[in-house]
Amino acid sequence: MRITVPEHEIEFSAIRAQGPGGQNVNKVSNAVHLRFDIRASSLPAHVKHKLLAQRDQRITKEGVVVIKAQAARSLEQNRADAMARLAEMVDAAAHVQPPRKPTKPTFGSKQRRLKAKSVRAQVKAARGNEPV
């Protein structure tokens, strides 16, 4: 199930990127901080709950997701990267694990387990018969 996050619920701010880049890194704000308030969003309630329950350093105590993107040299690419990472995070929270169907052990597996138990019991019983 693909959930899209509305653009108006996301706040972007351009910041200066870290790392190498010479004079360009000191002049141009190419990195992006994406801020997304989970509690105030229009996401379904179960997705909000799963997102807030995650122990992720990108989610603040107030329930705001902060993603920093600075891999690319252009602001647009960093914006797209941050949006993709947010979408990936929301999709992971929206994924519902199918319920496990309990199964019974097979006849062969029961026989192997009982055989291993009896072999082990014989080994232990043989230890007690040795004189010290």
Image (cartoon, rainbow, N blue to C red):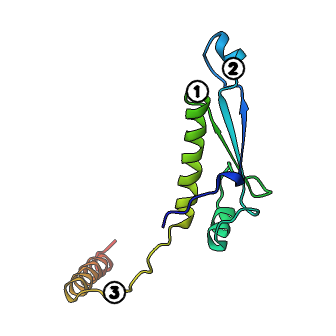
Q: Which of the pair 110/41 is nearer the observer? A: 41
State if disc 3 and disc 2 touch (CB < 8 Å).
no
Question: Residue drawn at (23%, 80%), measured in percent from left and top?
Answer: 119
Q: Measuring from the top left, give residue 70's x and y in whole percent.
A: 61, 31
Front label number (2 vs 3)? 2
Earlier-in-chain disc, 1 versus 3? 1
The disc labelled 3 sits on which kind of residue?
Thr
Q: Which mark is residue 103?
A: 3
State if disc 3 and disc 1 touch (CB < 8 Å).
no
Secondary-structure class at tag 3: loop
Answer above or below: position of 81 versus 123.
above
Q: Which mark is residue 11?
A: none
Q: Residue at the right extreme?
A: 62
Earlier-in-chain disc, 1 versus 2? 2
Crowding near the residue tagged with mark 1, few <14, some 14–19, many ≥20 C-alpha atoms within 10 Å: some
The disc labelled 2 sits on which kind of residue?
Val
Secondary-structure class at tag 1: loop
How far is mark 1 from mark 3, CA to CA? 53 Å
Question: Residue drawn at (64%, 61%), measured in percent from left and top?
Answer: 54
Mark 2 lies on residue: 28
Question: Residue drawn at (75%, 63%), measured in percent from left and top?
Answer: 39
Crowding near the residue tagged with mark 3, few <14, some 14–19, many ≥20 C-alpha atoms within 10 Å: few
Q: Measuring from the top left, give residue 43's x and y in whole percent.
A: 65, 66
Q: Which of the pair 80/70 is nearer the observer? A: 80
Crowding near the residue tagged with mark 2, few <14, some 14–19, many ≥20 C-alpha atoms within 10 Å: some
Earlier-in-chain disc, 2 versus 3? 2
Left or right relative to 5: residue 118: left
Mark 1 lies on residue: 74
Left or right relative to 119: residue 74: right
Secondary-structure class at tag 2: loop
The disc labelled 1 sits on which kind of residue?
Ser
Answer above or below: position of 33 versus 29.
below
